[in-house]
């Protein structure tokens, strides 16, 4: 292992092939220089980098996000992933503004230099969407509201990135650091961020080495180097089957599927009990449900800077969507906001920069639509429990 400032490497040999695992810091100019020098050295047949297809595309074609159909994203249930990506982007943007160093510069250097010397470039990281979904799936259902609130806190944060966080980025993973900003137990809860990705990248590297005798330069975050090296040098299953299992999207447990319907049954049972006692009580329970659930969802949309029509749609939709787990209030208000505001190409181009501040989230129509989704969903969720307890109190009172 060699020690260059903020960089180190481990060489691993398997049969007639070898790989150099070059550990880099995501906020270090010296890492950019080390990657450039290694790729241009002529020692390697190909370069493998810690990016997935989506992150690679966004790096080489920043305007690709302009092609995103927000209404389609909301309708297909991909809004949570987009919000998480924007929150991580905000974290990275704040680092860039503080240090004057664009995070991921070493990956960009590997891309540019591999093209300059005309050697193949391989993407070895798992799709960011699958990683985010597996993170969410790894969190017990009763902890997910805390995760959601942490994400919201990160979205609304205007704080500078702490010096300790910046120092950690020289030794760990960008995605891990960004996640840790909005979840205090990220180290233990987010195993898909590090352990699974170590295994995934080891599988991809092993497959590359198995094609033919070759010498590969793998550019990965310094925090991944020991894990990948250990896996490549062990009897761990690194087959296509192991790779496929890591690409599986988490399945919803039976308990998680049933709980929303149980809540709906309890609420509807409360309405039925109220009407069986008296029409006046039944009507009172329904009014409480509408006012509390719709009111809190509308309040969330108002705080997000939603259009008045979107605010009204939250009040109307939340009481109904809360009784139908197949559709959420956030989806409805997000679609309404996107349809009314109609984000422009300029909004898409500037969204990654704008999300670095709360003002930017409210100004940019793309970011604001996502914020409307988040706060509309949160308001409705809180309203469901508050109204539920209110109904229960009236029935037993």
Image (cartoon, rainbow, N blue to C red):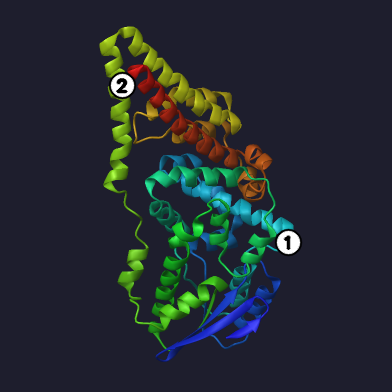
Between 100 and 389, the one lying in front of the other is: 389
The residue that appears at 54% across and 35% down in the rendered structure is: 372
Residue 56, quarter of the rendered image: bottom right
Q: Is residue 145 above or below residue 17?
A: above
- Residue named by callout 1: 99
Q: Is 332 placed left or right of 352 in the picture?
A: left
Q: Is residue 232 above or below residue 193?
A: below
Q: Residue 257 appears at what percent x and percent y?
A: 30, 42
Q: Nearer the viewer, mark 2 or mark 1?
A: 2
**Quadrant the N terminus occupies:** bottom right
**Quadrant the C terminus occupies:** top left
* Observer able to see residue 81: yes
The residue that appears at 61% across and 40% down in the rendered structure is: 344
Between 2 and 70, the one lying in front of the other is: 2
* Observer able to see residue 313: no
Q: Residue 364 appears at what percent x and percent y?
A: 63, 40
Mark 1 surroundings: few (<14), some (14-19) or many (≥20) residues within 10 A: few
Residue 189, quarter of the rendered image: bottom left
Q: Is 33 placed left or right of 270 in the picture?
A: right
Q: Is residue 248 above or below residue 218?
A: above
Q: CA distance from mark 2 to mark 1?
A: 56 Å
Where disc 2 sits, the SS reads helix
The residue that appears at 48% across and 26% down in the rendered structure is: 314
The residue that appears at 59% across and 42% down in the rendered structure is: 367
Between 259 and 78, the one lying in front of the other is: 259
- Residue named by callout 2: 270
Q: Is 142 placed left or right of 265 in the picture?
A: right
């Amino acid at each position: 292992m060699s020690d260059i400032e903020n960089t180190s490497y481990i060489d691993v040999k398997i049969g007639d092939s070898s790989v150099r695992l070059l550990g880099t810091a995501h906020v270090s100019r010296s890492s950019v220089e080390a990657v450039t020098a290694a790729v241009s050295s002529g020692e390697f047949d190909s370069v493998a980098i810690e990016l997935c297809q989506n992150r690679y595309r966004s790096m080489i074609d920043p305007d690709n996000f302009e092609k995103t159909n927000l209404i389609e994203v909301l309708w297909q249930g991909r809004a949570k992933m987009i919000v998480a990506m924007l929150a991580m982007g905000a974290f990275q943007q704040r680092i860039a503004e503080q240090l004057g160093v664009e995070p991921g510069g070493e990956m960009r250097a590997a891309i540019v230099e591999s093209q300059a010397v005309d050697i193949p470039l391989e993407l070895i990281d798992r799709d960011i969407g699958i990683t985010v979904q597996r993170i969410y799936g790894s969190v017990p259902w009763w902890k997910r509201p805390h995760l959601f609130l942490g994400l919201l806190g990160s979205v609304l944060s205007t704080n500078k990135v702490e010096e300790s966080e910046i120092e950690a980025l020289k030794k760990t993973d960008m995605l891990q650091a960004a996640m840790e900003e909005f979840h205090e137990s990220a180290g233990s809860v987010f195993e898909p961020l590090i352990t699974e990705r170590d295994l995934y990248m080891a599988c991809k590297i092993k497959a590359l080495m198995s094609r033919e005798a070759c010498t590969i330069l793998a550019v990965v975050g310094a925090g991944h180097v020991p894990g990948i090296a250990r896996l490549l040098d062990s009897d761990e299953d690194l087959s296509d089957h192991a790779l496929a299992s890591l690409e599986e999207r988490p399945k919803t447990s039976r308990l998680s599927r049933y709980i929303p319907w149980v809540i709906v049954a309890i609420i509807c049972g409360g309405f039925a009990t109220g009407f069986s006692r008296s029409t006046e009580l039944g009507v009172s329970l329904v009014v409480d449900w509408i006012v509390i659930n719709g009111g809190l969802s509308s309040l969330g949309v108002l705080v997000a800077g939603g259009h008045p029509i979107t605010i009204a749609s939250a009040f109307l939709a939340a009481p109904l969507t809360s009784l139908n787990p197949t559709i959420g209030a956030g989806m409805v208000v997000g679609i309404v906001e996107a349809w009314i505001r109609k984000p422009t190409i300029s909004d898409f181009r500037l969204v990654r920069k704008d999300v670095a501040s709360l003002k930017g989230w409210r100004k940019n129509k793309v970011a604001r639509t996502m914020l409307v989704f988040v706060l509309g969903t949160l308001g409705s969720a809180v309203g469901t429990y508050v109204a539920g307890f209110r109904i229960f109190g009236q029935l037993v009172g």
